[in-house]
Structure formats: C-alpha cells, structure tokens
Amino acid sequence: MKKPIVGISGSELTKNVGPFVGYRRSYVNKDYSEAVIKNGGVPMIIPFNEDADVTESQLELVDALILSGGQDIDSESYGEEPQPEQGTVWQARDQFDMRLLKLAEKRGIPVLGICRGVQLINVFHGGSLYQDLKYYPVPTLKHWQGDTPWWQATHQVKLVNDTHLAAIFDQVPRLRVNSYHHQLIKKVGKGLKVNALAQDGVYEGIENETGTVLGVQWHPEMLRAHQAEMNRLFDYLIKCANGKGRDEHAE
C-alpha cells in the first residue's frame, strides 16, 4: 500500500548574525517529520508562502495535514485588541495556516493541530483565545515548562469520554503531557468540542464531530520517543489518511 503523504505547515527562521543578517530559512522541527515516518507516513514540509494558488497546489499533493507550533495568533483574527501579554504575532503565517486548514477541510483530508495548531483550528472556526495565562479567570497550572526537558511530561490532562481523542488512547482517563503555551482556548469554535482538560479547567484539546479535525495543546511529537503512547495520535492521523476512521483504529 502506498504510504500517505503528510504535509506539515512550515515556519521561517531569520538569521540575525554575520553576513546573512535578515536571511530567511523555511523549516519545521525535526520531531514532526520523525513522528510521521515512525508511524508509516511520508512527511512533506509545506513552506510558508503568500501565494494562494501555490498553497492550493501544495495541498493537492498531501493526504493529511499537521498544523505545527509557533507564534501567537494575532488577536485581530478573533475580533480582539492586543493585550499587553500577547507575544510575537505573524499575520501572514496566520493567513497561510488558515488557507491550509480551509483547503484540507474542503478536500476532507484529516488534520492534526499541535499547540499553535489547535489554537488556529479554534480561531478559524469562530472561537477565541485568552491572550495569556494571566487573563484566565482563576489561577492556572504551569503551562510553560521552561528549562524542563521537552521530552518530559509535566502535568496531567483528563480525556473527555465519548470523544475521538479518548478512543485513540483506548479510553484511558488521563495522560501526562509536556506544556509550552501561554495562550489558551477561551470560546470554543463552532462545530468543535473539547476532548481534553487540565486540572485547572484549561482546554487541552478540541475536535470536530467526525474526528477528521483534531488538535491538542501539548507537543506529542516531542514526547513520542520517550512516551510511546503519543505515537497513537500520528498513527490515527495516518490511518485516517488511508480511509480508516475512529472505529477501525480502536479495534
């Protein structure tokens, strides 16, 4: 059987030292590609660009999409003015990722959003974000683990019963995850439901009714080499790309 091609939304790095000041490089973290390869897919980085026709042609080449992590999402996307703790935003990348998501949903290919990716899915569907942990109505857990190694889980999430995410993890009630975000899902987007929560009530994942669009706030691609069950998310995405849904995956 042909291995599914999994597109991974790309970002850019800008060189700020030496003779290449201002020189830009397309990239994604290697863990995304490794996670796809180890679970039976073929990774394809989709470089950031601002040409809608090119983006559409890029999406025609893939069987599934991962929306990767990165910058804060501009609050203008959900109708709010920026608050002091909003971090660096990049409107052009917001628009690029939203084009990718729109095209993927139109084609009916599965989507996995990770960290920024889950927030973008939510905003695309009319949801909103808390621009920083300090704007959440009650004190939160530590959701940015700082210098703690990326492969180390630092807090629990509770999986919501009768969700695709719970089925992916064989109905285990809780997972331990890593955490690298300071923005949080506030209003949940139309057609989406929460599938995971931290103990402080922070939404840690969302999905659509069919499970073809699913996102998590943590970084399973960083955890999977040390926490094997995190491979289940990538296995699920790739099986969905092969036309196998939740029920078959859970068997």
Image: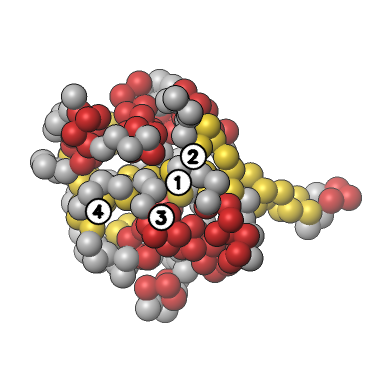
Image point (47%, 68%), residue name:
74
Q: How far apart are marks 2 and 3 (CA)?
A: 14 Å
- Say which of marks 2 and 3 sits in front: 3
The residue wearing badge 3 is 107
Q: How is the image coloured?
A: secondary structure
Q: How far apart are marks 1 and 3 (CA)?
A: 11 Å
Q: Which of marks 2 and 1 is nearer the N terminus?
A: 2
The reply, left or right, for residue 118 in relation to residue 171 is right
Q: What element carries label 3?
A: helix
Can residue 56 be seen?
Answer: yes
Q: Which image quarter holds the N terminus? A: top left
Side of 188 where 16 appears, left or right: right
Residue ID at (45%, 42%): 63
Tell me the element at label 2.
Answer: strand
Q: Marks 2 and 1: CB-CB under 8 Å? A: yes
Binning the other alpha carbons within 10 Å of mark 2 as few (below 14), some (14 to 19) or many (20 upward) gives: many
In this view, 102 is above or below 3? below
For mark 4, give the secondary structure.
strand
* Quarter of the image where the C terminus is located: top left
Q: Note whether residue 66 is visible.
A: no
Residue at the disc numbered 1: 65
Closer mark to the observer between disc 1 and disc 3: 3
Amino acid type of the residue tagged 4 in the rendering = Asn
| Spot occupied by residue 9 in the image (x, y as percentages of width and height) | 53, 49
What mark, if any, has residue 6 been given in the picture?
2
Pointer 3 and pointer 4: residues touching (CB < 8 Å)? Answer: no
